[in-house]
Structure formats: C-alpha cells, structure tokens
Image: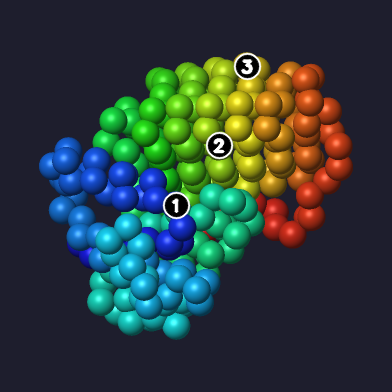
Amino acid sequence: MKVVIIGAKNPETRRMIDAIIAAGNPDRLEFYGFLDNDANRQGKEFVGLPVFGGFEHLDRLIAEGCAFINTITGSTLARYETSKAISARGGKFINFIHPTVNLPEKIGVGNYIQEGVKIQAAVEIGDNSSIHVDSIVAHECKVGNSTFIAHAVSISGEVEIGDGVSVGTNASILPRVRIGNWATIGAGTVVLKNVPDYAVVVGNPGKVLRENERKYANGAI
C-alpha cells in the first residue's frame, strides 16, 4: 500500500518509518512521499522522500489508491480541518504508530502515536488523534477524535478526553476527570476537576483562563 504523509516538517517522521521497516513492516507499507501546502517545501525532498506539493495533487493520489497519514500536531484545528478535507474527497487514513507501542483493542483510524507512549488496559482512542513521546494514558481512559497529547503528559485512570483537545507538555490529569471538546490544557497544568467544552485551562491547580473559538461541535472526520 502506498502511503502519503501530510506535513513535511518533523524529522521524527523518518525515525518512525525506519522503526516500522525494522520491525518487519507487517502491513507492507510503501512510504511514497509528502503533501505540504507550504510552497517553500514543495518540489524538494524531506527525510529522503519527495514533497509532491499541496492539495492540487490530492485527487491524483487518491485515484492511485494511496492511503494518508496526518502528522500535523501544532494545532488540533488544523489537524481536524486537513483530515476532514481529505476524507471529504475520498481519501482514506491509516494509523502511524511506533511498533513498540502496546495498542488498545479499541482504536480508530488516522492516529499518530510516537515512541515511548504507554497505554494501559481498556483504553479507547478515536480517530485522527496524536500522542507524543513518553506520554502515559492509564487504564480505562477514553481519548476522542482529532485530539493532541504532547510529550510527557500523564493521564490518570478513567479520564475522558473529548474531541479536538490539546494537552500541553508535562500536563497531569487526575483520575475520573472529563476534558470537554476543543479544550486546551496548558503545558505543566495539573487538572483536578472537569473542564468545560472550549475552555483554556492553565496552572497548578488548573483554572479556566478563557475560551477557544466555538467553531466546531466535535472532531469527527
């Protein structure tokens, strides 16, 4: 299967590809190249693969039967809108997951999970989410769609994280807390209680600072 990666920016992508190949590449993926709407990256190579260009190549690649991986993580809104646009044109997503990660039984498609992530029993992960290096997702947690969990985040047991959520580096979320859709948890924040939809929470203990734009109700692609 030919695979096209969205976003020619993070060199960690090469290490992920090499780890998958070293583990035997059980899904027989052919890492074909990148799409990136940044004109400065187009027509060049990134980590040894061509950057075809932007979305003007999308229909051709879909017609060729390519699957897609989304590595956009700087903004959950950008990640969601990009994946939604590709899906609306018939593009299909696959998971991009480091082979050392012990995956849960219930996981959707289009997820990007890096090396060192620890996922405990009975965790559920939706579609189009990303979890970065050395984060912990404890037992019976639920992670929604189009959510980003930065590196070294600690999520305690039975936490529910909604769609479009962004959780910053070294944040800690205590047990049985619910994080609402499109909320933002700042780096280093300690979340002790439920977080409303669209809230921006910072500090120790975490407090609501303001609201994000109420642009979408959920993050399903």
Q: What amino acid type should be assigned to the residue bearing mark 3?
A: Pro
Considering the numbered disc 2 on the image, is that residue within a helix, a strand or a loop? loop
Residue at 16% from the left image edge and 53% from the top image edge? 28
Q: Earlier in the sequence, mark 3 or mark 1?
A: 1
Considering the numbered disc 3 on the image, is that residue within a helix, a strand or a loop? loop
Residue at 27% from the left image edge and 36% from the top image edge? 99
Query: In this figure, which residue is indicated by the disc labeled 3?
Result: 175
Q: Place residue 207 in its image quadrant.
A: top right
Q: What amino acid type should be assigned to the residue bearing mark 2?
A: Ala
Q: Place residue 35 in its image quadrant.
A: bottom left
**Numbered mark located on residue 204 in the image:** none
**Alpha-carbon neighbours of circle 3 within 10 Å: few (<14), some, or many (≥20)?**
some
Considering the numbered disc 1 on the image, is that residue within a helix, a strand or a loop? loop
Q: In this image, 9 relative to 204: left or right?
A: left
Q: What amino acid type should be assigned to the residue bearing mark 1?
A: Asn
Q: CA distance from mark 2 to mark 3?
A: 18 Å
Q: In this image, 120 relative to 141: left or right?
A: left
Question: Residue 50: where, in percent of width, then height?
Answer: 31, 70
Q: Earlier in the sequence, mark 2 or mark 3?
A: 2
Query: In this figure, which residue is indicated by the disc labeled 1?
Result: 10
For marks 2 and 3, give the one nearer the viewer: 2
Residue sitting nearer the eye, 21 or 2: 21
